[in-house]
Image (tube, helix red, strand yellow):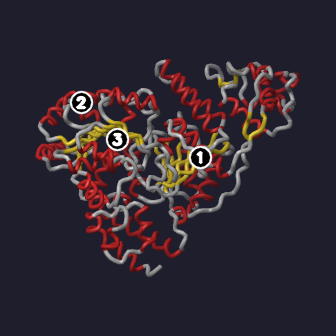
Amino acid sequence: MSDRARQLLHDVFGFESFRGSQGAVVDHVIAGGDALVLMPTGGGKSLCYQLPALIREGVAVVISPLIALMEDQVAALKQAGVRAAALNSNRTFGDSLAIERQMRAGELDLVYVAPERLLTPAFLDHLDGCPIALFAIDEAHCVSQWGHDFRPEYLQLALLHQRYPRVPRIALTATADGPTRKDIVERLDLAEGRSFVAGFDRPNICYRVVAKNSAFSQLLRFIEAEHGGTGGGQAGIVYCLSRRKVEETAARLREAGYNALAYHAGMEKAARTENQHRFINEEGIVMVATIAFGMGIDKPNVRFVAHLDLPKSLEAYYQETGRAGRDGLPANAWMTDGLQDVAKVQQMVLASDAPEGQKRIEQRKLNALLGFCETTRCRRQVLLDYFADHLPEPCGNCDTCLTPVESFDGTTVAQKALSCVYRTGEVFGAAHVIDVLLGSETPRMEKLRHDQLSTFGIGKELSKGEWQSVFRQLVAHGLLRVDMEGYGGLRLGPDCRPLLKGETTLALRHDPQQRKAKKKVAAAAAGLADPADEALFQALRQRRLALAKAQGVPPYVIFHDSTLVEIARYRPGSLEDLSRLPGVGQAKLARYGDDFLSVVADNGPA
């Protein structure tokens, strides 16, 4: 069976060999075994059920939570010559009946369906009459209340094992810490299956966190420096916490010359759908969105994900940044971090309808995220440690590795900050406490008589920005907390007493000065230094876009950027040469080979 799987891997998907544990998972599922598969985004999870679906008798039923994700997968599979379909609300009644007839007749290899539809009595009765190859449960972390994206309907999927005990099930996710993985196994009744944990590392992503200081201007500088600005033509996603900020940021990006769109749950459904369609099918669009956007996006050439506000947890951060660089080419995950963001996220946690126990879990997750933001260690090591996937050496591809962070003995300044919070009554935010420390003589200060406090003016050795960094770190360490039951003032944390009494010390980080980064354009990001190769790469992208528009499909389902890079680099002169490149299966070779070879010929020798 392995030989058959390897042959299909090459002929259908255009790859010579499996990556990591893919081959072991495929063999296990082909043989009828259940499995939990944890692989990073872009690590090839889909192949783990798509290949067994082509080999095992019957139709593979893939449970997927979002229509956009289903449509993306089906479009890509059809381009590769695979018989695939999706059953969702986009289908007419007649189309749905036709797909169900094909399932019963064994004329489809894979069918994608939402859990809500799968669990209806009518659809389960329909499945009873179908030859079923396997069940694939995508985004399996949705089954766990410990996870960041719990969906109650996923809890009922255990009935698949009860109703179809001889049909193998494979649960797949890119985002699950230890408790979430345990929950998936228990709730889906996978205890007798095998777990394949391939790790979380995405080495092509460069992680960066900067202190928030005019976030929009910082975003513009980042895109200009790292992604070619308005002329770079690179796709990106910008996440904001509020709908209003999404709209404002998208408008300001358009004013600055970017092709920017907005996406949030408050928009009309038709407008959201149209913007998502454009992002998927066009090149060079920057999508500004709340977290309502992205779970169903399989676009591989998103070159950057920027957070203008903090996400809720490290799982959410990992999931959202994982939408960058799915093609394996270099990508950036860039985030601004400010103390006001902590207050906003904490308010969201407290205001939710979740039980108190769940709120405590979410608060712990937020604390882990704050620790990631304020670390002096390699960010990738901190991120992977959270998922119990340890990296032995610093990665060399994050801001703390590229620009090592200096730490200093912050015991004295922390004591000053904590004392000032206490003496001002534990009701004011950081801005006012910093004014007291700096000795700012303002009417408000005089009115409150805070210019009479012993802490007035004792912090002039640091600038306002440096004090902001200190307060962020004190909150991250739990020595201060934001009082969300009042007006967002700072209060002393329960563990601050030993530090105040001088019984412990505290190391703090110096926020590095932002340096002007070296400008990178699209081809450089793709690893093409030769201008002739760059020109060919851009010509190949244009041909791909034209072919995609003619068919009404996303460009990347024809070929990923990574395949175009290989074509530009090696300049194949024949169909046989082209077939040797990754991502070129037999169906795509027959359909598009001559088109892309003509582009190579028209652009001359390297």
Q: Nearer the viewer, mark 1 or mark 3?
A: 1
Q: How many marks?
A: 3
**Residue picked out by circle 1:** 393
Secondary structure at badge 3 equals loop
In the rendered structure, are the residues bearing label 2 and label 3 in contact, judged by CB atoms less than 8 Å apart?
no
Secondary structure at badge 1 equals loop
Q: Amino acid at mark 2?
A: His
Question: Pointer 2: residues within 10 angstroms few (<14), some, or many (20+)?
Answer: some
Pinpoint residue 157: horizontal percent, then vertical percent.
28, 30
Reply above or below: 547 against 418: below
> Residue 293's quadrant in the figure?
top left
For the point 80% across and 20% down, which residue is it? Answer: 501
Report the side of 357 relative to 346 (left or right). Answer: left
**Residue picked out by circle 3:** 66
Pinpoint residue 292: horizontal percent, then vertical percent.
44, 39
Q: Amino acid at mark 3?
A: Leu
**Residue picked out by circle 2:** 161
Q: Amino acid at mark 1?
A: Glu
Question: Pointer 3: residues within 10 angstroms few (<14), some, or many (20+)?
Answer: some
Distance (Cα) linking label 1 and label 3? 37 Å
Question: Pointer 1: residues within 10 angstroms few (<14), some, or many (20+)?
Answer: few
For the point 41% across and 45% down, which residue is it? Answer: 272
In the rendered structure, are the residues bearing label 1 and label 3 in contact, judged by CB atoms less than 8 Å apart?
no
Secondary structure at badge 2 equals helix
Report the side of 174 relative to 506 (left or right). Answer: left
Distance (Cα) linking label 2 and label 3? 23 Å
For the point 18% across and 49% down, which residue is it? Answer: 108
Q: Which numbered disc flags the more N-terminal residue, 1 or 3?
A: 3
Reply above or below: 350 against 74: above
Q: Which numbered disc flags the more N-terminal residue, 2 or 1?
A: 2
Res. 527 in view: yes
Reply above or below: 174 against 357: below
